[in-house]
Image (cartoon, rainbow, N blue to C red):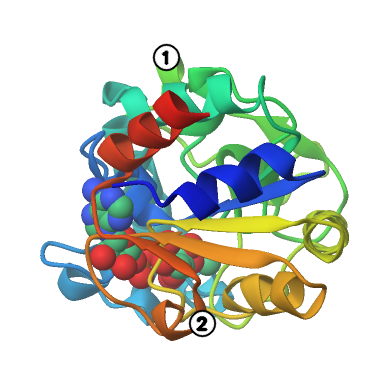
Amino acid sequence: MIDDRLTAALRAARRVVVLTGAGMSAESGVPTFRGAGGLWKTYRAEDLATPQAFRRDPALVWAWYRSRQRAVAAAAPHAGHAALVRLAGRVPLTLVTQNVDGLHQRAGSRDVIELHGSLWRLTCSAGCPHVAEARPEAVPDDDAPLPRCVCGALQRPGVVWFGEQLPEEPVAAAWAAAADCDVLLSVGTSSIVYPAAALPSAAREAGAVIAEINPEPTPLTAHAEFVLRAPAAEALMRLEVVL
Ligand code: OAD
């Protein structure tokens, strides 16, 4: 199932970038955004994931994020997360994720570049630089007071909302890695949300080959040299076997 040319490219690579999306977490039981049962099929993003929604009803937004925190806290990384940790021991790998769930880190991946922030960071809604950590084992009840920053303003989930810029540092790190990689492996993302969806093109322009792991076709498929039509856990475990 793994093309020998992909194996050879991975073995010879000076740097491999892996870009993951919600499909990476699907087998842990964390819903994707756009598939069947996806979050944006059930909820309206503009009611829950915009700065305007937070200003209008911070309690509603926090209730939704706390329910997502609880769902992720109850989930566990799967065999594909573990395979990526071991792959990083064999090839020089930079892991870039659009996921905010922290499952890569819980599996043991280090230095994960989080393009869309994290459910486990709380930032200041008034823009002061103070950042706090949230713990999966201590997600507050819905009737708990909303969290406050040291400056007195409400804290907000440390994730990127619609209409917001991505954080500069992770973007710079991801694009620098893409410009310097020989293989980019896209795993479990619909490849339609920019700027993350442009990362494979940046790698390709720098001469990298593109491989995609996704049970479904995406806009990236046509630009990928290698396509593994399989769920993330199965495909990553197969890759690990051949490397
Ligand atoms: P999507 O929900 O848009 O896409 C998930 C992708 O995962 C789809 O292409 C599925 O075919 C694929 N998939 C499903 N199950 C899979 C499995 N077991 N193994 C591999 N792939 C599987 O999620 P993203 O592409 O991550 O942004 O969405 C990008 C961004 O849109 C998210 O980070 C989020 C959302 O709005 C923010 O919250 C800022």
Snapshot quadrant of residue 86: top right
| Whether residue 99 is visible | no
Mark 2 nearby-residue class (10 Å; few <14, some 14–19, many ≥20): some
Measured as percent of width and height from the top left, residue 113 is found at: 71, 45
Q: Looking at the image, tell me whether mark 2 or mark 1 is earlier in sequence order.
A: 1
Identify the amino acid type marked 2.
His
Q: Between 212 and 148, which is closer to the camera in this rendering?
A: 212
Point 46% across, 79% down: residue = 220
Snapshot quadrant of residue 236: top left
Using the numbered discs, state the Cα–Cα distance from disc 2 to disc 1 in whole angstroms.
42 Å
Which label was assigned to residue 137? 1
Element carrying mark 1: helix
Whether 88 is drawn above or below 221: the answer is above
Measured as percent of width and height from the top left, residue 178 is found at: 78, 62
Point 46% across, 40% down: residue = 101
Q: Between 68 and 139, which is closer to the camera in this rendering?
A: 68
Element carrying mark 2: helix
Whether 216 is drawn above or below 21: the answer is below
Instruction: Tell us which disc is closer to us: 2 or 1.
Output: 2
Measured as percent of width and height from the top left, residue 82 is found at: 44, 21
Mark 1 nearby-residue class (10 Å; few <14, some 14–19, many ≥20): few
Whether 130 is drawn above or below 98: the answer is above
- The residue beneath circle 2 is 223
Whether 62 is drawn above or below 53: the answer is above
Identify the amino acid type marked 1.
Glu
